[in-house]
Amino acid sequence: MAGLVVALGWLMACDSRAEPPTPVALVPTVAPSPAASVTPPPTPQPTATTLPTATNLPQPTATLVPTPLPTAGPLPAGWQWYENTTFEPAEFRIAYPKTWTVWLDIRGSRIQPTIGIVYQATFQSPETGSSVVLDIWELRGRRDEDLLQWVNTDPSRSVFDRVDEPLTYNATVLGRPAVFHYHPARWGTNDFAVTLFVTGQHRYRATFHSGSSPVTEAEPQIYRTMLESLQVFGQPDGLTEIPTGWEVGAGLVIDTRPIETAAGELVDLAAAPLLPLGGLAGIIESAQAEPHTYRIVLVTDTGETYIIRRESWRVHFRGQPIDSWCNANVVNPPPQPGERVTVTGRLIAPNEVVAGSITIERDGVTQTWCSETLIEIAPYWGEGNGFPTNAVVSAVDVPHLWLRGPLQTMVGLLTDDAEPPLLPAAWQPYADRTALVYGPVNPENRHMEVKEVYVQDGPCDVTPSTTHCPHWLQILPEIPQSD
């Protein structure tokens, strides 16, 4: 099946985000040393559509009796203790992998003063660049400060993210109520998770930031183990429990937020009508780069004026955008006033378009600036409810394509059988599941070559602004499944 090309003779003229701060390497207090393999036991994955809430949550008003810092106990092979005994009264102890490096920042020598963090310890993997950052704030005697109120006042500051609904207590750390938040990889960020809690006179934040995309299998468990090992002077050694299910990392993430028109109306982009075949052609009157948008005022060949918007990516798979591609290395600068362009896309208001593809005529050559690379395949696609055997998908001026739809619908692209096409026996259980098919486009014949096939292997988590489907099974090339 290798090298199979996908022939319907299509021709495509195809393209808040607060990010956790990158830890600053300051003064290393522990040098990395050789150690045994750090592979804590894997955490079972749930099948629920949302992150399970940790059980046995204490009430925020629970009275906990202070206790001395316990004696350090034994650790698994490959782990060691980090102890802070110099920064009073926030003395603590936490376990971490021996191969990781520790960096310190005390009382804001490099932290922005307005953030108010008085102590920061960064534990970082030299292999992947992933990190666990422990931040500490002083509450200046306000022991009853409301953590939830602080977290929800500015989530972009507290959890580095925008949220659809106010965050609530959904975890415990040292027996204290805690807030856990997970951000699947998208918008230029990798997977990260944040846990916040208060003990005594201090507020703590422990952030895991994956240095790779997709996230490695072991590192989310390392984060969990570090949290479970945390001990704080004067605080009881209580239960630590955070939600599960996020450890698999980001899968398919779809931004479903409505688009706001120039008139202030909110429009469902997926439901907006497509421009007529051939799109719009004309001369750019003005062009302006805005946050996450490139806005063009286009005067068409028929004398009409349109606002053309090139929006940020809205569909990501395992952290990478898949719905469009921009040829920024070749078409640079982007389209400018006075240049001729052709635009396809969706009409979100009279004379306002969200572009799917934009081609530009420059120096006597027509080139693609941005183009769509994700094709949605409906269940009723094609006369025979799918592609014929040995079908070919063609594209122009894009390096790759993604197809999304029921696996059975795309069987003709994926098999060498005579008509009618049949799925291999091993794939038949997935026939009705949503599949993602990826392949590079051969620049010589412009045919897509099917290289990877994934089928959805679990439910999606749906919020007002995002649909996240984390569970996918790769069936081409087949990935051996661990027992």
Image (spheres, grey):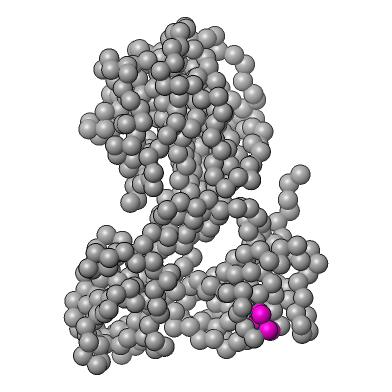
Viewer-proximal residue among 38 and 287: 287
| Residue nearest the observer in this picture, 156 or 112 | 156
Rendered residue at 32%/86% (across/down) = 280
| Residue 31 place in picture, x, y as percent | 48, 28
How many marks on residues?
0
The single residue placed furthest to the right in the displayed view is 425
Is the residue 111 above or below the residue 464 in the image? above
The magenta span reads 384-388
- The quarter of the rendered structure image containing the N terminus is bottom right
Which quadrant is the C terminus positioned in?
Answer: top right
- Say above or below: 143 vs 242: above
In the image, taking residue 194 as reference, residue 340 lies left or right, namely left
**Front position in the image: 210 or 333:** 210
Q: On screen, 158 above or below 6?
A: above
Q: Residue at x 42, y 71 (%)?
A: 271
Q: 150 above or below 355?
A: above
Q: Quadrant of residue 306?
A: bottom left
Give the x, y percent position of residue 243: 54, 35
Q: Is residue 16 visible?
A: yes
- Asked if residue 12 lies in the magenta stretch, the reply is no
Q: Position of residue 433 (x, y in %)?
A: 66, 63
Q: Quadrant of residue 24?
A: top left
Residue 22 appears in the rendering: no
Find residue 285 and report its horizontal and vertical position in percent: 18, 81
Q: Main secondary structure of the magenta part?
A: loop
Q: Give yes or no for residue 386 being in the magenta stretch.
A: yes
Kindly identify the residue that appears in the image at 51 percent across and 81 percent down: 395
- 287 lies left or right of 371: left
